[in-house]
Image (cartoon, rainbow, N blue to C red):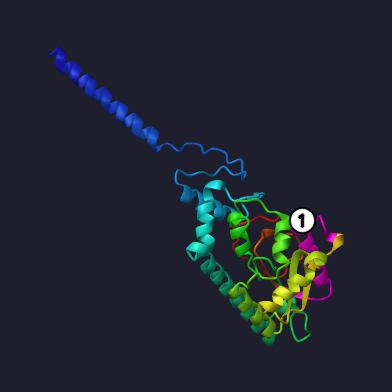
Amino acid sequence: MAASAAAVLVRYCLLLLCAAAAAVAQEVVAPPHDEDNDTVLQSSSSSNYCLSWRLGAETNNVRGWWTVPAQCCGYIQAYMAGSGQYQRDVDLIVDQIMGHASNVAASITTGAAGDEGGGDDGLDAWVLDVDDTCLSNMLYYKTRRSYGCLPYEPLSFRAWASKARSPAIPAVLGLFNYLRDAGFKVFLVTGRDAEALGDATRLNLLRQGFVGYHRLILRTASYRGQSGEVYKSEMRRQVMEEGYRIWGNVGDQWSDLLGHSLGNRTFKLPNPMYFVP
C-alpha cells in the first residue's frame, strides 16, 4: 500500500514538472539588445527578425544604422536581387504615385485644385531624388558593399558614380516621363557634390533617358556638411520661394521626405541597403 502511494506521488510530481516546463516555454523572454542597430527587436527565426528589421527601417522606426545587421545580409540580398520583391514593391509604390499625379493633373485642368492653386502658369512641380530613386546603385552595393553589410565609403562611391553607369529604375523613369509630359516641372534634387559629380550625374541621367527635367540641383560647397534632411529642406524651400507648387516629393530616404517645405504629398521608395540622416 505504501509503495502504491509513493508511485502515485511520483507521477503527480512528474506532472507538475511537465506543466511548469510548458509554462516556461510559453513565456515571452525579453529580447536582447541589438547594439549594432540600436534596436531591441529579436526573434528566434533569423528570417522573421530580418523581415521585422527591414519593416522597421522602411518606416523610420529603426534609425541611425550604418550597416545591415550581419544576420540579415543574405535576406537583404535576396530581397533586393533574388526574389523580385524589391521590384514589385517599387512598382506598387510608383503605381500609387502615378494615381496621385493623375488626380493632381486632372484637378489642375478642371480648376478643382482649390486653395493650393495650379494652372497654366508653369509653376506646378514635382521633386525627385536621384540615387536609388531615379538611378539604381544596386550593382555598386552588390559588388562593393555587400548589399549594405559593409559601411558606406565616400571615395569608393564617388569613383562608382563618376563612371555614369547607374541604370534607371524603370518604374521611376516611366513616372518621370509622365510628369514631364503632363506639364509638371520636375526638379531632381540630389546630395551628390556639384563639383565632383555634376557632369557625371548629368551624363548618367541623359544616358538613362531622364531628358527634359526642369532643373538638377546638386550640393554646392556652401551646403557641405549639412545633413540630408537639412540640405534638401533648404533646396525645396528655395524652389517654393520661386513660386513653384510642389505636388509630390519622391525619395528612397526619409531624409528626402522630412523637414520643411515638403509639398503636397511625399512618397518613400524602399531601400534597406543604407541610411542617410
Residue in the picture at 57% in, 48% down: 69
Give the residues drawn in magenta, as a range.
Answer: 223-245
Q: Secondary structure at mark 1?
A: loop
Quadrant housing residue 264: bottom right
Q: Is residue 115 left or right of residue 74?
A: right
Percent coordinates x, y for residue 115 in the rendering: 74, 76
- In the displayed orientation, state which residue is furthest to the top: 2
> Which residue lies under the disc numbered 1?
227
Near-viewer residue (105 or 41): 41
Residue in the picture at 30% in, 30% down: 18
Decide whether the magenta segment is chiefly helix, strand or loop: helix
Percent coordinates x, y for residue 135 in the rendering: 65, 70
Q: Give above or below for 137 relative to 21.
A: below
Tell me if residue 219 can be seen. Answer: no
Tell me if residue 228 can be seen. Answer: yes
Percent coordinates x, y for residue 17 in the rendering: 31, 26
Please tell me whether residue 240 belongs to the stretch shown in magenta. Answer: yes
